[in-house]
Image (tube, rainbow, N blue to C red):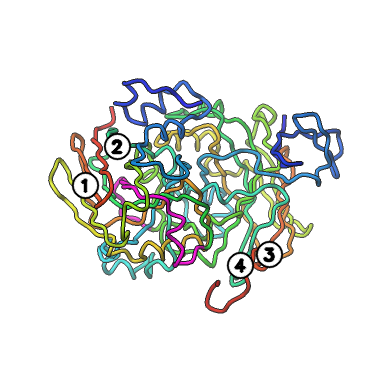
Amino acid sequence: MPLRLTPQDRNGTITNILANSADERGGVLELLTERLPFAAPVAPFKLSGTVYGTLLNHKSALAALGEKLRAPPYLKAPNAPVLYLKPRNTLAVTGERVVIPQGVSELAMGACLGLFIGSTATRLSEARALEAVSGYLIVNDISVPHPDYYRPSVRYIARDGFCPVGPVSPRAAIDDPDALRVRTLVDGREVQVASTRDLVRPIRRLLTDVTEFMTLAPGDILAVGTAAPAPMVRSGQSVKIEIDGLQSLFNNFVNAA
Amino acid sequence: MKRARVAFAGAIHEAVPHGNAVANFELQLADGRIVHEDQVVWLPPVEAGTIIALGLNYADHAKELALNSQDEPLVFLKGPGTLLGHRGRTRRPADVEFMHYECELAVIIGRRACNVERSQAMEHVAGYCIANDYAIRDYLENWYRPNARVKNRDGATVLGPWLVDAADIPVPVSLALRTLVNGKVTQQGNTRDLIFDIPYLIEYLSSFMTLAPGDLILTGTPQGVVNVLPGDEVVCEIEGLGRLVNTIAADDEFGLTQVVGGSA
């Protein structure tokens, strides 16, 4: 049964809600779905709870590694798409506070386009890949800054509240997903402008290469890759992310109590 | 108590063992029907939330893969599309050299866990099952190891056959586990050799991510992983949890014909 939200919940962080919820049997996704403002009804009308992030899929992210890209332990650029998971505990919505963990002074922002999967996507052809996408949204793929891409700890990536997502807009809201400006503002000041034009694997190709080895399910989100260098944010700051044609994502950052 | 989720005669049912037979046994469905085990389709015994897996959590396996000691568990996450039930069939792509099973004790979370201390950790465990978490080493890359193409493949994480209540396994610290390929023992170990034990893992994970009911922790595998080929029957056994059967299938079963340079 979905939880009822109190006004206090709406102002709290998802972490607080998880910690204070009386519902021991879950209810987390129902709650998130209730909180996730759909800009318009978009199938399957709910989140699966799984968000996949794509590593080094923006040309600026590869370029930022420079010589390290070919040095040990990496030796070469990724061959197939390298994905990581932002599990359900990381989900948050626009307006929620994101908690900066103790011992961490700043967090790396990861503004990117998210593909909202509307139908079961297995072994898609490039020509038909977008048919599996029912909508688009903004994802902030937040992480604790970490220099290691070889085997980084999930504690940098999968913390509660580390994946705020914006309202889902229907696919028709975007003409060309490979030509979108992605803008990050910290306290109202523009700190990063990137474009989906500069993806290593453009959207259709990414969907084809991912679904070659794993199925994307309805309600999954595939975040297509963040640009480098990542803007850093400290406690007390606010972040707004804008993508042409989509509703923006806004979150405040606070230190852990 | 141990429970399975099975598909039978048009619906999904909870089922318990019926009678005492070890082989060729029967199941009793919640609605009272008694069915033979091969009349049903076995599903993963839980509808999983977040799937958390441990790499190199047995000292011998870490050594087998030439890895140094760790100061923190090597955790990676998997999506629910990887799960497969008992007696399922797992695809081995035709172009790979090394695909191996990993027999693991899986812990199912029963109560939300946020900043839980080690001493209280076991109160958050609903039960246990066996996991066989296949890997295809050909696809290993040096980025965010182990990358999803190795470890997050459709139907390559077999789970079951039963969800065994935590109360039935009061001391999960010393369970023998082994894997047999076509009847021959290829992997043996004991959960007493876990580098990071279950209470530690729950304390560690819940310190930064809230665990919710239905979340799974696959605790890692001991040494003895070998290559498996289409047609091989792979059986993973853990003391008190039963035996989990899987068969390796070739591409043609999945509508894939061998095309040089990639799939159609």
Percent x, y for residue A238? 20, 38
Task: Determine whether the residue tagged by mark 4 lies in a helix, strand or loop.
Answer: loop
Q: Which residue is mark 4?
A: B93
Q: Which badge, 4 or 3, is on the more N-terminal residue?
A: 4
The disc numbered 2 marks a residue on which chain? A
Q: Which range is magenta?
A: A124-149
B16 sits to left or right of A202: right
Percent x, y for residue A113? 32, 53
Q: Which residue is mark 3?
A: B253
The disc numbered 1 marks a residue on which chain? A
Q: Mark 4 against mark 3, which lies toward the viewer?
A: 3
Q: Are marks 1 and 3 on the same chain?
A: no
Task: Determine whether the residue tagged by mark 1 lies in a helix, strand or loop.
Answer: strand
Is B254 in front, or is B142? Answer: B254
Is A77 in front, or is B65? Answer: A77
- Tell me the amino acid under the disc marked 2: Thr
Percent x, y for residue A187? 15, 40
The disc numbered 3 marks a residue on which chain? B
| In magenta segment, residue A147 | yes
Q: CA distance from mark 1 to mark 2?
A: 19 Å
- Tell me the amino acid under the disc marked 4: Pro
Crowdedness of circle 1 by 10 Å Cα count: few (<14), some, many (20+)? some
Q: CA distance from mark 2 to mark 3?
A: 45 Å
Q: Residue at x 23, y 48 (%)?
A: A242
Q: CA distance from mark 1 to mark 3?
A: 49 Å
Q: Which residue is mark 2?
A: A94
Q: Quadrant of the C terminus of chain A?
A: top left
Crowdedness of circle 2 by 10 Å Cα count: few (<14), some, many (20+)? many
Q: Which residue is mark 1?
A: A232
B208 sits to left or right of B58: left
- Tell me the amino acid under the disc marked 3: Glu
